[in-house]
Amino acid sequence: MNAKLTGKLDGYMTAYRVSCARAVVAEAERRGLPERAAVIAVTTTIVESTIENLTYGDRDSVGLFQQRASWGSESERLNPAYATSAFLDKMLRLYSDGSWKTRPIGEVAQGVQVSATPDAYQPQAADGQRIVDALQVVKPPAGAASIYGVLNDGRLTYSVIDMPTGNRTHTVSSTETLGFVPVALATLNFNTLLVTSPEGVLHRVDISTNSTSLKFSAPVALGGGWTHDMLTYDGHGHLYGIADGKLLQYVVSGTKPTSGQVGMRKEIGTGFTLKNLTATGDDWLLGVSNTGELRSYKIAADGTWAGATLADRWGSFTHLLSPGSGIYYGRTSAGAMYHYFDANPFDLSGTDLDYNVEDPVDEGGWTQILLSAQTS
């Protein structure tokens, strides 16, 4: 962000200031106000506190907006949500005709703050806009995540998780087994799976129903030599697998592929010693390293790749899966399932990764040995 700012915070944006600005933007969005409200508020904090929640100021002023005692108690004014809401309340009262949407940002900020330096706000308005553009709170998409699993006796499971809330709404298990316990599992689409047998044979599994019960046809063998530790499908024609630390890419050319429609093997790279692997979108992968780092990878059309660490301390997750759209699910060895949201899953950065560890999908019960989400 420092490379984009041109005002008084040019070169001075810090992680702390970002967190304060994020709180201001989040409060404006919570109230359902247009983006301009957040821009006015952030611009004001640039001038008043350089976007820091200050415990001191002129006379009895404190907080992001340097609000005086008449705005509330000290603890209230030091609460970013309260302080932002109080600022917005006054703005809406002063400009009840809605003219705050069209008047110059500096003029509106001065109207609310009644500062001794009325011309200080407008020069920072461009940076206020840039900061809001970068920090608008992107919410998880509507819809449901479809998740298939394999139990240790070879039976299949199907679960549905509501993506915005992270609540599991549906689970069914098959009564029949696959006839073997798979080594790897990938979901091609809503009713088609790929699994590998302990003998290294790739099978297609066609699901006939997953509503009130889970039923499937007998697995169809597609070929041997599939000695992969894990598989994942990116939803856009590419199947990825890891075997002996090699990341491999295959082209899948049918929704119900035959033996000749899974091939064109390409070695992407070596040294991929990951505990798990999932696809997050078209040629984007996610996995946890043996040292517990959450890693994101972009695979280019020519087979080259770029990777980055999004977060550390993810070593407790034995399974990782994603339906796309920035939604990540991590399952622990104890059977708990947690959900996360990455506002921009394609930036090779974890700064916008939202943790929901205090609100798990389930605190236990996920006993599958393999899990795979249908990735969009």
Image: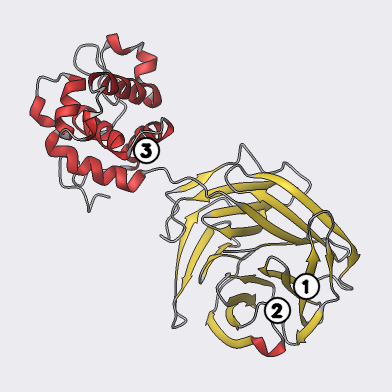
Q: What amino acid type is highlighted by mark number 2? A: Lys
Spatial CA distance of label 3 from label 1 is 46 Å
How many dots with numbers? 3
User: x, y percentage for residue 263?
Assistant: 63, 87
Verify CB contact (< 8 Å) between mark 3 and mark 1.
no
Q: Is residue 123 left or right of residue 139?
A: left
Q: What amino acid type is highlighted by mark number 1? A: Asp
Verify CB contact (< 8 Å) between mark 3 and mark 2.
no
Q: Which dot marks residue 256?
A: 2
Neighbourhood count class around disc 3 (C-alpha, 10 Å): few under 14, some 14–19, many 20 upward: many
Q: Which element type, helix, strand or loop, lies under badge 3?
A: helix
Q: Nearer the viewer, mark 3 or mark 1?
A: 1
Determine which quarter of the picture holds residue 179.
bottom right
Determine which quarter of the picture holds residue 211.
bottom right
Spatial CA distance of label 3 from label 2 is 45 Å
Examine the rendered structure and indicate whether residue 50 appears above or below residue 353. above
Q: Is residue 204 left or right of residue 233?
A: right
Q: Nearer the viewer, mark 3 or mark 2?
A: 2
220, 332: nearer the viewer:
220
Q: Which residue is mark 1?
A: 206
Neighbourhood count class around disc 1 (C-alpha, 10 Å): few under 14, some 14–19, many 20 upward: some
Residue at point 64% right, 55% down?
A: 145
Q: Which element type, helix, strand or loop, lies under badge 2?
A: loop
Verify CB contact (< 8 Å) between mark 1 and mark 2.
yes
User: x, y percentage for residue 324?
Assistant: 55, 59
Q: Which residue is mark 3?
A: 22
Give the colour scheme of this rendering.
secondary structure
Residue at point 75% right, 49% down?
A: 170
Q: What amino acid type is highlighted by mark number 3? A: Arg
Neighbourhood count class around disc 2 (C-alpha, 10 Å): few under 14, some 14–19, many 20 upward: some
Spatial CA distance of label 1 from label 2 is 8 Å
